[in-house]
Image (cartoon, rainbow, N blue to C red):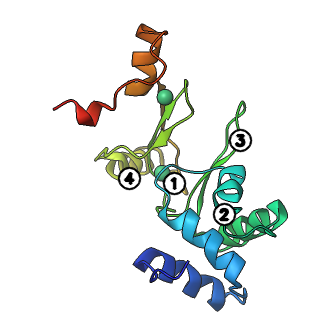
Amino acid sequence: MTSPDTPRLAAITARLRERGYRITPQRLAILRVLAESPDHPTVETVYRRLLPDIPDLSLATVYKTIAALKACGEVLELQFSDRDNRYDAARPEPHPHLICQGCGAVADPELPGVEAMAKALARATGYSILTHRLDFFGLCPKCQIKRDKPDQASPPDPSEKK
Ligand SMILES: [Zn+2]
Ligand SMILES: [Zn+2]
């Protein structure tokens, strides 16, 4: 909890303070998880990650902190009809996502050209584009191994097979 702020965490806390939010130690811990987790955690995930360090943390505090981030435009919320919302405070601007239908992993693919597509669409239609959402659904490499070999309890990490 004493590690120095990353640039993104510093930007988030500055923005919240500007808007009159108090940065309590609990809020800071929540913001740190949200700003530094590449896996797009749910509210529950953030809560469970922090509970060992902050036993008196409440789920409501996590919800309220995310609401503050949303009010400041500093988090991207991904809503789903069949699963819990996921949050990306590392990259609050709209960007495409890869979503595993097996384990629920959510990743940020490098996909150039999306912004250009939005601009071209605005030009072609006369719409002013405010935001966009592009999700790719499928099975991550680990879940593909599980599907092909269901007996194999823990598939090897593909990055170790060199
Ligand atoms: Zn998966
Ligand atoms: Zn993302």
- Which quadrant, please, contains the C terminus? top left
Kind of residue at badge 1: Ile
- Residue 66, image x, y percentages: 70, 65
Q: Is label 4 in contact with label 1 (beta carbons under 8 Å)?
A: yes
Label disc, if present, on residue 50 of the rendered structure: 2
Relative side of 22 to 154, left or right: right
Residue at 56 percent of width and 87 percent of height: 14
| Position in image of residue 22 (x %, y %) | 72, 88
- x, y percentage for residue 145? 39, 17
Q: For the residue marked with disc 4, what is the amino acid?
A: Lys
Circle nearer the N terminus (3, 2): 2
Q: Confirm or deny contact between disc 2 and disc 4 (CB under 8 A).
A: no
Q: Residues within 10 Å of mark 3 (few under 14, many from 20)?
A: some
Few, some or many residues within 10 Å of mark 1 (<14, 14–19, 20+): few
Q: Amino acid at mark 2?
A: Leu
Circle 1 sits on which residue? Answer: 129
Is the C-beta separation of discs 4 and 3 under 8 Å?
Answer: no
Q: Secondary structure at mark 4?
A: helix
Element type at mark 3 = loop
Marks 3/2: CA–CA distance: 18 Å
Side (left or right) of 9 relative to 142: right
State the residue lying farthest toward the left.
Answer: 162
The span from disc 4 to disc 1 (Cα, nearest Å) is 8 Å
The span from disc 2 to disc 4 (Cα, nearest Å) is: 40 Å
Residue to which mark 4 is pinned: 119
Which callout, 4 or 3, points to the residue nearer the camera? 3
